[in-house]
Image: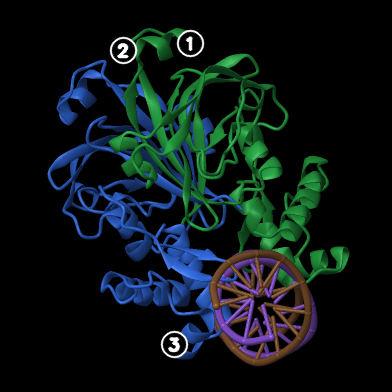
Chain colours: A blue, B green, C purple, D brown
Amino acid sequence: MTVKQRELAAKILHRIEAGEFAETSRLPTEDQLIEQYGVSRYCVRGAIAVLAEAGEVFPVRGSGVFVREERNGIYMPISTSYGIAADFPDRKVVSKVCELAVTRADEQLAKRMRCDVDAPVWRVVRLRCVDDLPISYETAWYLKEYVPFLNEDIASGSLYRYMRDDLGLRFGFTDKVIHMGWLGAEAARRLGLEEGDPAICIEDDAFLSNGRLFNASYNLYHYKNAKFYSMASMR
Amino acid sequence: MTVKQRELAAKILHRIEAGEFAETSRLPTEDQLIEQYGVSRYCVRGAIAVLAEAGEVFPVRGSGVFVREERNGIYMPISTSYGIAADFPDRKVVSKVCELAVTRADEQLAKRMRCDVDAPVWRVVRLRCVDDLPISYETAWYLKEYVPFLNEDIASGSLYRYMRDDLGLRFGFTDKVIHMGWLGAEAARRLGLEEGDPAICIEDDAFLSNGRLFNASYNLYHYKNAKFYSMASMR
DNA sequence: TAGTGGTCTAGACCACAAA
DNA sequence: TTGTGGTCTAGACCACTAT
């Protein structure tokens, strides 16, 4: 969705959160929103689609757009994600850098990252915490070709923001594979769990907008602290 | 996305799978597709969006729409899902019905299903198998208000297809929460695992298009046989 | 029957990539 | 500079809900 549509969605969300539609739990009609904001129907529908995807509203044909009841709990979205920091804008997101070094891709990594064997890559291992709660133990690789410089200071913040705003990289899409994994000694120690404990494991391949893979990662999530949600339309 | 757009996407996908674009790994331009199929740009862009969401192609502004390299392995999509049968149209999907009975909602279930305490609900427990491999142990509840009749024969097939085609229910959206769980004795026995083994657990709330919840379920996935994938744009 | 969201078209202009 | 996908508008008609 476009910037304009997201901005409109944010405005409407503020009105929802202010309780403006609490009585009827129904948004203004599309035509009313068109007039209120002076935009086209295309924009209004885009904004509503953003809100619907986020699970905030659901449109009913012939009837209106209804506000969904509040969801409880804190969950990580599984689909989107410009990184964990973007997922929790209001929370204290801290990354403890456990390893940071340039290495060379072995055969297996080269295959996964579609790069040459021995191509230089950053290897970054971090413990990700939200509000001082350990959430995940992440092992990530970044092609040095696209990320020429990195240090502990940058890695302890939002790497995605750095790559986007400072390096000018443009992200395209990600592939995620979710399965079960088990904690090694180091991961367990950092997460405060026991070696051999099970973990939800997400392998993430991130591509630039030109289709080139630039980042692969292996994430082990704390089985108590991390939950995920996903909202989907069934049409 | 609309039916027309999905159909167009299917046609384009057939051409992709036939290797028609293998050389350049690039689709015809939007204008060419408009002409080839005699539809508007709206439709073409919708069809490409469908393919992009499915991870088949990625559009690059100013350049074209590119075919993605083939993915390997069999994974379950985490977002969509008209049920497991729809996810694997080419595979043998079998459900073994372990329990099927009408019960009454206790306080906890009533809260989750937004129904009255003591409201009649079907409780259905099934072992879901794909190609004879046990995938998940599912405990599901359906409001009898919306699903007046059910039997083992129906439950051993696709319940969603039954509800949609035979009962005329119209689905709206689902909420999924993914976290870690552990197998009880019965689930472990059915899945061929050990009691206390870890499992990826997906709790699923399904709503009709009018926003009414009609189905809640608790799914424990076989930690070896079930993997999930998710494709997401990062814009 | 009136009102609302869903689909679709035609056309304009913008942002970006490649030649 | 040209061609591509991205955004946006205006307007038409359809499908469904509510009255």
- Among all residues in the image, which is located at the extreme left? A132
Which image quarter: residue A215? top left
Side of B192 relative to A25 (left or right): right
Q: Residues within 10 Å of mark 3 (few under 14, many from 20)?
A: few
Q: How many marks?
A: 3
The image's mark for residue B196 is 2
Name the residue tied to disc 1. Answer: B190
Using the image as rendered, state which of residue B122 and residue A80 is in the foreground: B122
**Closer to us: mark 1 or mark 2?**
1
Labelled disc at residue B16: none
Secondary structure under tag 2 reads loop
Marks 3 and 2 belong to one chain: no
Name the mark nearer the viewer: 1 or 3: 1
Q: Is residue A230 left or right of residue D17?
A: left
What is the spatial separation of the Cα atoms under label 3 and label 2, in whole angstroms?
55 Å
Element on which disc 3 rests: helix
Q: Chain of mark 2?
A: B
* Pointer 3 residue: A37
In the rendered structure, the answer to whether residue B134 lies left or right of residue B139 reads right
Q: Which chain does the numbered disc 1 sit on? A: B
Could you tell me the amino acid type at mark 3? Tyr
Question: Of callouts 1 and 2, which one flags the residue occurring earlier in the amino acid sequence?
Answer: 1
From what the image shows, is residue A68 above or below residue A129?
A: below
Q: Give the SS element for disc 1.
A: helix
The local crowd at label 1, few if under 14, some if 14 to 19, many if 20 or more residues have their Cα within 10 Å, is some
